[in-house]
Image: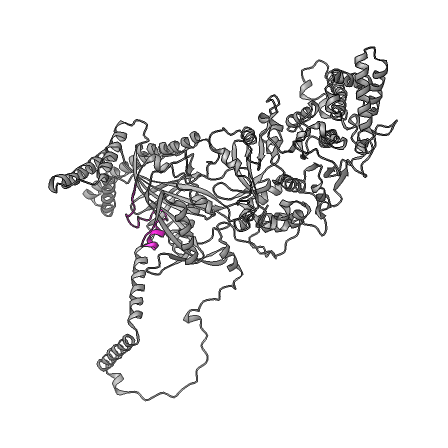
Amino acid sequence: MTTYDNDIASLFDPQLEDPVPVIPPGALPPSWAAGRQSPAPQPGPRAWSEVELPPQPIAEAPEVDARASDPTALEEETRTLERQRKTSQRRGKSPADRDNAAAKKRADRARKSVRLQLTGTSGHITRTTRTSTAWFVQKQGPWNFRTTGKQRRFIRDEAMVLTNLQQAGVQRLHRRLVRTPFPVEQWARDHDQWAAPIDDVPGALSWAEYLRGQQHAMLWSNATIKGRYWGIELPQRSVLGIGLDYLAHTLGYVASWPLLGALSSLITGWADDAFAREEAALAEHLAELERIMAGRGVNAAPAAPAAIDYLLRRSATIGLPLAAGGAGAGGGDWGEGDVAALEDLTDLSLTPGDGYTTVSGVVEGRRYTGAVIILTVGRMAPLPIPERMLPWQVIGDPSGEALEWSDRIELHDKAKTIRTMRSLTGRIEHQFDHYTVEHDQSPPKELAEQHARVQDVISDVGEDHSGLSARTSGWYRVAVVGATPNEARKKVAGLREMYKPHIALEQEHGQFQLLREFIPGQPLANIANKRHMDVEAVAAGMATAGDRIGDRRGVVLGETSSIAPRPVIWDLFAAHEIKHKSGLTPIVAVPGSGKTFLAGMIVYQAVRAGAYGVVLDPSGPLKELANLPEFRDIARVYALTGRGSRPGALNPYRVIIDPRRDDPEYDTGHADFARASDPFAAAQAKYDADMRAAAAERVEVAVSVLKMMLTERHLHLDHTESVLHLAANRVGGDRDHNLGEVLAAIQEIGEIDPDQAVRTCASGVYQQLELMSRLSEARVLFPEAGTVGGGVDDFDTDIRLTILTMPGLQLPPSGVPSSQWTPQQRMTAPLMHMAAWLANRLVYEKPRHVRKVLFLDENKYLESTGAGRTLNLRIARDSRKFKVRALVCSQLPDDFLGLDGTDDKTALTYEVFVGDVGGDPHAIDGALKLLKLPSGQGFEQFLAELGSGGEDTLDEDTDTSYQDQARRWIVRMADDVELVRSSWVHFVHLSHVFAALDSSTAKNVLGGAA
């Protein structure tokens, strides 16, 4: 089978013979990746009946021994030969060989003793010969960047679920945390459906190759999604019901007899009634369990057949890579034959004394072998969760390993807990008397501490009415998998270091039985390391807590970096199309933090997916995107400054366009005119009003541009503002004017105005502006005499990617007063201002229904004037109506918050990116406001450490900044906030894009940076 570039469906065919090696998804350790190139396994030996024997020559019949006809003699000779054979075998074996053989027999007996107790499934219920368990699925939940109070509420909500289960009569739970591979195939399908991809270009990266490369890159990160199964043991049948069933079954053989038949019929009726009552009680109990599990804190639903299928298969194959499909087909209930097939999914072997179990099996047609070590949670110190620690069952997740947990929990009611505590109190008091009375010695202080602790427990349980003091006992085990035993041991050592000093992880004997304990229905392997905790301490494990941000159909941003890494995917237009929110997206970071590179990757992926892109990049690194082969003939670069610029290209009177009369907004059938007596007149009135507003806006923008060109001395003259507005109003707001006419009006005011002070001010302002208009940088603002400027109306509206650059622009140095700026540096603000208005126009002149991406750099120049703030506000408010994703970059959060707090756009932002803000406390406070995070909760430390992953120093011996050059961002999308690593190390198919984005970030992207 072959794949054509436009055959998207073939990308998801598992039987596809792809020339690109497909990486098994899920938790595939890198050391196993090399094993994919190993030769296919050779076929095993055939059965004796299948072996073709060579032809044997016909021999003459030997002479028959007379003893052969004597059965007694023949039997005696056979026994003699057998004794001789066994004696020779024993003599040939050394003592070590005999010890190894005996150990192998013991291991085989131990394995045979661990048989699956599961007999089948019915819906979401698994059955053994003695118990039935109802399974519910809890999805992965949020944790990061929540306040301490909210995290504590998460814990208490889950604790209340445990309490409610105990009050409903539940005594035992089996919780299984399982992993499913990140659904990259589903992402590719959804992304292809979400996008309207541009046409493929011969010789360039095709859409099919692009999707395939994105999937491979995401698979290499071994990303998984967590889910926890809650197995609730159901009540067993009553002894009376079981006895009646037995009697009814036994008397069924004599049902046709006269007297015994009547008794059989009576007993059968009783048995049926008892079963019906028990069935009704069980249905009511299951309904109550569903209500409890659906409550806040767990929000779990009964497991679907596919989920049960995956739970059983995954539990039986721990130690092997996750299957690509995640959940299995889930064709229905499991019978005894189906359960027996679980034994054949893996080959388990155990070497006594090695402390691990070897697992071998076939995943998607390839055989893998792994080593599994089961660790059990041992002694635990007081856990400061959530104030200073992650939940104790996710402490190991940052290692990147796909850890799986098995929890066996027993719930105790209040009366049993008090009885147990009082019994323990008696034993402690007897020990105390043993020291003091019998031996006249001082008892150790630990006895007094234990006694006080027991009394505290009795007091808590006896006086508590919230239910949070309910007690549990349980066993908590985690599976660690390695490609080899040494790799597994190394991972165990790392995991133990992560849990120290608060929690001890014990590696117990009987690893085979401990591994089998993960399978539903299996009994406890041992009773060692039994942990006694209240429900709140159990809930503080929060095993399903993970990173939650983004969606699963948009463009790729990197991977999460808070708990467990997984791809971060962002639908750029979900805010517009689904949530009806603004498309303004601030990107805040100091220079060199990767703002331009991140925006470039977003724009590239968006344009590939069919969006229109407009980029204002003064420094120009993004202009190389137009030279990419896939953007051939659909991208243009326009230089707004320098030798290649067009005179009058940024003339404010031409940049700001008039509304179009044929726009749907002015159609008589629009909903706004439905109640008007004359819809045509109402539409025309709205159009005329918008025309007047556009003219007024041109006047205001012209005044703002001229003010930016003035020095501080002229700007603060008493009549400067009135002179500029008077001159602009005399010229008018029609599109056929230019700034040169405004200068002429100012000159006229300086000559004929009756007020001497006004004439003096106007003359000074005119001289300053006339001098500035002669600069080469000003030619794009001041067209030649008698013209309005050329080139502005010549932009091709069919171009997919328009990039505006400003070569030669001299940015003013930060920290230097504007009074010390050169004339060329003073021209930066008006040029950037009008370039932003032009970029805005190129976006908004496109049809409303098409998707558009706008990138604006150096937002601080827009915020310096009222007209610029108006433009930013328009971007924030109108981006939803026009389906615009506006990526606006700035170095400080104040550019979006407003210097005086009166221009705060926080309420209009739905997505925010905050990078390294330099550690400045004021900038950190502003970033917290922009991210809608409270202060004083420890989030300041995250923002202060958003620089390089290592420690940057000039000392070559201790410099670690090179270890992780990926840029890190705190990203807010709706209510989700996560730490995101902009890592592209596995996206080798986009190496030409990284080369085009010529920046320090791009240069290191394939070497471990992003």
Q: Residue furthest left?
A: 438
Residue 117 in the image: above or below residue 613: below
**Does the magenta run of residues contain 528?**
yes
Residue 141 in the image: above or below residue 991: above
Residues 895 and 558: in front is: 895
Q: Which residues are magenta?
A: 506-531
Question: Residue 343: where, in percent of width, then height?
Answer: 38, 55
Position of 362 compared to 245: left or right?
right
Q: Residue at x 43, y 47 (%)?
A: 403
Residues 584 and 725: in front is: 725
Image coloring type? one colour
- Secondary structure mostly seen in magenta is loop
Q: Quadrant of residue 897?
A: top right
Identify the image quadrant of the N terminus: bottom right
Q: Residue furthest right?
A: 786
Question: Residue 503: where, in percent of width, then height?
Answer: 35, 44
Question: Residue 937: where, in percent of width, then height?
Answer: 46, 31
Residues 701 and 809: in front is: 809
Identify the image quadrant of the C terminus: top right
Q: Residue at x 52, y 64 (%)?
A: 39
Question: Residue 946: where, in percent of width, then height?
Answer: 54, 39
Q: Quadrant of residue 666?
A: top right
- Does any portion of residue 731 appear in the rendered image? no
Position of 699 compared to 372: left or right?
right
Position of 652 compared to 937: left or right?
right
